[in-house]
């Protein structure tokens, strides 16, 4: 499967990756701030979240990691750190800021992973997995660095929102829906799943040890 307009797809891919990098970097830095780390530690966590999933995806797909092809991704992470530092008082007042940025990053990077895998000629089931890895793996790296239980191992709907978004992308793509509409629909759907799951405390069943 290929896009009818490769140039448009490439442009959309770049915009999504840059926006997702900033959103995920903000999320990582906010989590680091909650642990009272210094500015450098915050930058490291921001970078880990912003490039971790995409790096793993690109290595698995056998291509140069996306952040090594342009300095803009590192610049985005530094700008995210400066934003948190400068607007710390305002950001602190928004108790759910980290959740919002984490959700935006998840949705954007899921789409970026899907599109990159499809552009490289991978089947859709692989593309959905790559989307999930791109969206969720950075958060795992962040949580390990901060000595937290990775969010994907908790009952919170996270990786499943990414997979559900990937399935919707597949369906719209199969129906021949225009790429812009497909991307926006997938983005909104993933965000909606996350927000509704948090609002109404929806989660997957917990595994319980047999006694």
Image (spheres, grey):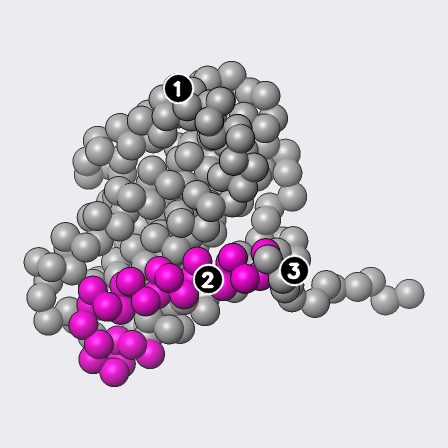
Specify the quadrant that holds the C terminus.
Answer: bottom right
- Cα–Cα gap, marks 1 and 2: 30 Å
Residue tagged 2: 192
Viewer-side residue, 54 vs 12: 12
Asked whether the residues under the numbered discs 1 and 2 touch, taking CB atoms below 8 Å apart as contact, a structural biologist would say no
Circle 1 sits in a helix, a strand or a loop, which is it? helix
Circle 2 sits in a helix, a strand or a loop, which is it? helix
Q: Position of residue 57 (x, y in %)?
A: 36, 52
Residue tagged 1: 86
Question: Is residue 91 in the magenta section?
Answer: no
In primary-sequence order, the first of circles 2 and 3 is 2
Q: Position of residue 153 (x, y in %)?
A: 63, 53
- Cα–Cα gap, marks 2 and 3: 13 Å
Question: Is residue 191 in the magenta section?
Answer: yes
Side of 37 where 106 appears, left or right: left
Asked whether the residues under the numbered discs 1 and 3 touch, taking CB atoms below 8 Å apart as contact, a structural biologist would say no
Q: Position of residue 34 (x, y in %)?
A: 59, 28
Circle 3 sits in a helix, a strand or a loop, which is it? loop
Viewer-side residue, 109 vs 33: 33
Q: Residue at x 46, y 62 (%)?
A: 192
**Disc number placed over residue 201 in the picture, else none:** 3
In primary-sequence order, the first of circles 1 and 3 is 1
Magenta-highlighted residues: 171-198
Q: Is residue 65 visible?
A: no
- Cα–Cα gap, marks 1 and 3: 33 Å
Viewer-side residue, 74 vs 172: 172
Judged from this view, the residue extending furthest toward the bottom is 175
In the image, is residue 77 above or below residue 169? above
- Crowd tier of the residue under label 3, counting other residues whose Cα lies within 10 Å: few below 14, some 14–19, many 20 or above: few
In primary-sequence order, the first of circles 1 and 2 is 1
Q: Residue at x 29, y 32 (%)?
A: 76
Viewer-side residue, 69 vs 45: 45
């Amino acid at each position: 499967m290929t896009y009818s307009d490769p140039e448009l797809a490439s442009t959309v891919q770049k915009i999504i990756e840059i926006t997702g990098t900033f959103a995920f970097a903000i999320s990582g830095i906010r989590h680091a701030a909650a642990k009272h780390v210094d500015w450098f530690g915050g930058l490291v966590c921001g970078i880990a979240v912003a490039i971790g999933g995409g790096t793993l995806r690109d290595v698995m797909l056998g291509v140069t990691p996306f952040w090594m092809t342009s300095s803009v991704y590192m610049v985005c992470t530094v700008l995210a750190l400066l934003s948190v530092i400068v607007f710390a008082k305002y950001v602190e007042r928004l108790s759910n800021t980290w959740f919002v940025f984490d959700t935006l990053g998840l949705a954007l990077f899921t789409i970026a992973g899907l599109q990159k895998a499809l552009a490289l000629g991978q089947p859709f089931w692989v593309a959905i997995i790559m989307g999930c890895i791109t969206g969720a793996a950075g958060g795992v790296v962040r949580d390990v660095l901060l000595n937290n239980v990775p969010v994907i191992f908790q009952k919170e709907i996270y990786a499943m929102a990414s997979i559900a978004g990937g399935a919707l992308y597949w369906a719209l793509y199969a129906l021949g829906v225009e790429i812009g509409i497909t991307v926006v629909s997938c983005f909104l759907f993933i965000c909606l799943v996350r927000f509704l799951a948090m609002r109404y405390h929806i989660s997957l069943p917990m595994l319980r040890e047999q006694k």
